[in-house]
Amino acid sequence: MRLLVTGGSGFIGTNLMAHYIPRNIPLLNLDWNPPLDPSQRSWWRECDILDEAAMETLFREFGPTHVVHLAARADTDEPNDINAYLQNHEGTRRLLAVVKRTPSVERLVVTSTQFVCEAGYQPKHDLDFKPFTLYGETKRLTEVATREAGLGCTWTIIRPTTIWGPWSLRYRDVLFKVMRKGLYFHPSKRKVIRSYGYVGNVVWQIDRILEAPRDLVNGRVFYVGDRPFDLRTWVEAISRELVHRPVRYIPSWLIRTVALGGDLLKLLHIPFPITTGRFRSMTSDYITPMDATIAALGEAPWSLEDGVSEMVRWYDGGSERIQAHTLKDPRQRHPMPAAD
């Protein structure tokens, strides 16, 4: 295996690189950001996947047999301009063109998202989409482009659920920091079923896809993550490990009021841990169909408790020194032509 990873400098990518580096296989990370983990820098080459010619040169030089495409803008903050996510749909289209022209590639994993369908909507088949954000729409376009690319290699689409674990700066800067300060309150004790995934299990699932028989994974779509669970189970496990006490609960109406204040602060570009979007996420079921993934790949190895312990160990082991990547705007590098 000669593995090329796009977006290997990000959260999932850092964990994926860490999984393969000890195997001593030829490995290359293409990303326009340096690795979150400085120890992975020797495997990194700076690359903008919207620069098709530069990307093709690096593919040709490395000659990958396996490609995992993770590069993307993954937040849902932009409500209006889809081109703020240009690296997602257009970047993937250009990557697919390069893969098609690279005869050494045998396997390709393309990353989509669970957000191609809104919460509460159960897709009837792989082409049944109902995105509710521009981010989700760009990932729908990503999936369509993958199917229409006419690839000769074995390809698989993965839809990550809500992924957490070491190197997640989002959870470091919001949930863990707030909980450690004693400021975390969970909205009511109502049961809320969510689809989350420990990153170690997602890496294991990607590895299984890369190694599985072709007929098992070719042209398939797999949600990656863990079986859906009661969100309280997760936050209670984190609280026990991080601060050694149970979670405190408050009425939903109260935290909803606080979340409205968070929305106002967000408009002023003042960070605040609770907004109405975050409140909805904490109080609404979001269940994704994991049965097909488990039937094809097996049960992932990490338990929730082991994952929490590993993340707390990472959090307390110097994670505060890790600098978040600065969000790059592809519209500045790749201006789009004005509409007629």
Image (cartoon, rainbow, N blue to C red):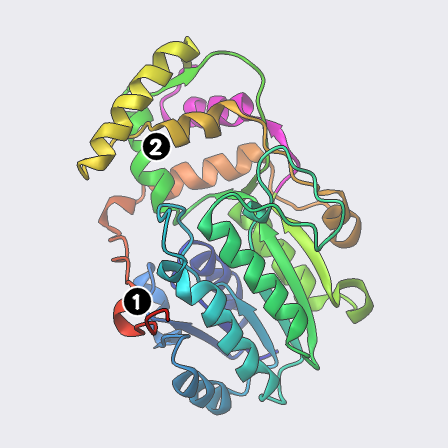
Q: Nearer the viewer, residue 19 or 220?
A: 220
Q: Position of residue 109 (x, y in %)?
A: 61, 66
Residue depicted at 47% across the width and 55% down the height: 12
Find residue 10 and report its image quarter.
Answer: bottom left
Residue 228 in the magenta stretch? The answer is yes
Say which element carries label 1: helix
Residue depicted at 56% across the width and 63% down the height: 142
On the rendered structure, is 74 left or right of 20?
Answer: left
Say which element carries label 2: helix
Q: Nearer the viewer, residue 320 or 223?
A: 223
Check the image and name the residue furthest to the front.
340
Please report contact status of discs 1 and 2: CB closer than 8 Å, yes or no: no
Q: Position of residue 47 (x, y in %)?
A: 36, 77
On the rendered structure, is 93 left or right of 228?
Answer: left
The correct choice, above or below, for 91 with respect to 111 in the image is below
Find residue 48 and report its image quarter.
Answer: bottom left
- For mark 2, what is the residue? 176
Q: Which residues are magenta?
A: 226-247
**Res 59 visible:** yes
Three-letter code for the amino acid on which mark 2 is drawn: Phe
- For mark 1, what is the residue? 331
Q: Residues within 10 Å of mark 2 (few under 14, many from 20)?
A: many
